[in-house]
Amino acid sequence: MTIRAVVRGVGHYLPERVVPNSEFETSVDTSDEWIRTRTGIERRHFAAKGETTSDMGARAAQAALTDAGMTAEDIDAIIVATSTPDLTFPSAASMVQDKIGMRRGFAFDVQAVCAGFVFALANANALILSGQARRVIVIGAETFSRILDWDDRSTCVLFGDGAGALVLEAQEGTGTPADRGILATDLNSDGSYRDLLYVDGGVSTTGTAGHLRMQGNQVFRHAVEKLAATAHAALDKVGLTGADVDWIVPHQANLRIITATAQRMQVPMERVVVTVQDHGNTSAASIPLALSVGKARGQLKEGDLVVTEAIGGGLAWGSVVLRW
Ligand code: UT7
């Protein structure tokens, strides 16, 4: 008997405030044209004052529960992927657990920056396959607007806030790639690249939250090489190739990275879910946001083979292959 972690519901939340590229033209030396052509980003959402990562994560989780036809009482575990939790502790997941009224099970955070959702999905899959949980909510939620340096044009124009969530449930499968659910995962990190993308503050160093710092073109180079490699590694584990893929749902950092990865995987752009123009880079939230928007657009359909891939600070990168 093979157990699979199958997607039962998906949902997302975006804060109300939408900020177009043009808003940055008055504060830093940039242009709508530069941002669009170098990144594909046209606008992003920023959280309201007082609106937190767990607020957004809870809204996304509720939407995913509604989509699944379940309530918080049906859930065994919550995993939140975030690098911008409300507080140093407790976890954002504990706060989401309280906000959705879940009084049983367990909740914890995963921190792998932009690759966080992929790492969280792999953890949820492991919990389900090992029998420790039957139903898990996996959330990506971020308020990167709180760690941006508004004077640094090379980073402040790139990021946005938001949250997305999936409800996964154990289901018996046949053990073949025809099964619905998570089929393969591939996780990687290399801490020797830590200085390419980091936050210059933290509890045991400065005692402050700090600001995001990135050597963008170096990260870009790694992304183009490593994203296709991790996607191929995950597909290889179940004997599939790019030709079998119905949808790539990539981390949404830069349209040029998304396009280059699809090319390397020999998957046409018509089979790639792209939301970067509307959300910017929402770090760990970007993949579940894209899954939710992709379903709402009618792109993702039951039975489709979906590949998600992401890279970010660490460097940490990985991929999940699942049948929707
Ligand atoms: O999600 C986590 C992982 N992160 C990523 O995947 C991000 C990966 N990196 C990228 O997406 C791209 O590298 C960026 C969008 C960050 C930058 O694009 P790029 O084509 O790699 O540009 P660059 O950093 O090589 O900079 C090119 C030029 C520089 O000027 P000079 O030195 O050529 O005169 C920058 O100073 O563009 C300049 N520049 C800007 N100009 C206008 C940098 N930021 C801006 C800006 N507006 N906002």
Image (cartoon, rainbow, N blue to C red):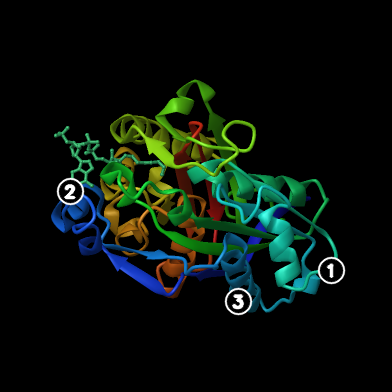
From the top left corner, tell me how far across and down residue 147 is, in percent: 46, 48
Q: Which residue is mark 2?
A: 29
Mark 2 and ligand 1: say if the CB distance to the nearest ligand atom is below 8 Å.
yes
The mark nearer the N terminus, 3 or 2, is 2
Give the quarter of the image for residue 181: bottom right
Mark 1 Cα within 10 Å, few/some/many (few <14, many 20+)?
A: few
Residue at the image position 22 percent from the left and 51 percent from the top:
28
Residue type indicated by callout 2: Asp
Residue at the image position 69 percent from the left and 57 percent from the top:
93
Which is nearer the eye, 136 or 8?
136
The answer to whether 31 appears left or right of 209 in the picture is: left
Please identify the residue farthest to the top as the structure is shown: 192
The answer to whether 87 appears left or right of 288 in the picture is: right
Q: CA distance from mark 3 to mark 2?
A: 43 Å
User: Is disc 2 in contact with disc 1, using a CB cutoff of under 8 Å?
Assistant: no
- The answer to whether any part of residue 213 appears in the image is yes
User: Is disc 3 in contact with disc 1, using a CB cutoff of under 8 Å?
Assistant: no
The mark nearer the N terminus, 3 or 1, is 3
From the top left corner, tell me how far across and down residue 60 is, in percent: 57, 69
Label drawn at residue 103 = 1
The mark nearer the N terminus, 2 or 1, is 2
Of the two numbered discs 2 and 1 in the rendering, the one whose residue sits closer to the viewer:
2
Q: Which residue is mark 3?
A: 67
Find numbered disc 1 in the image and state the secondary structure of the residue it sits on. Answer: loop
Residue at the image position 28 percent from the left and 51 percent from the top:
268
Find numbered disc 3 in the image and state the secondary structure of the residue it sits on. Answer: helix
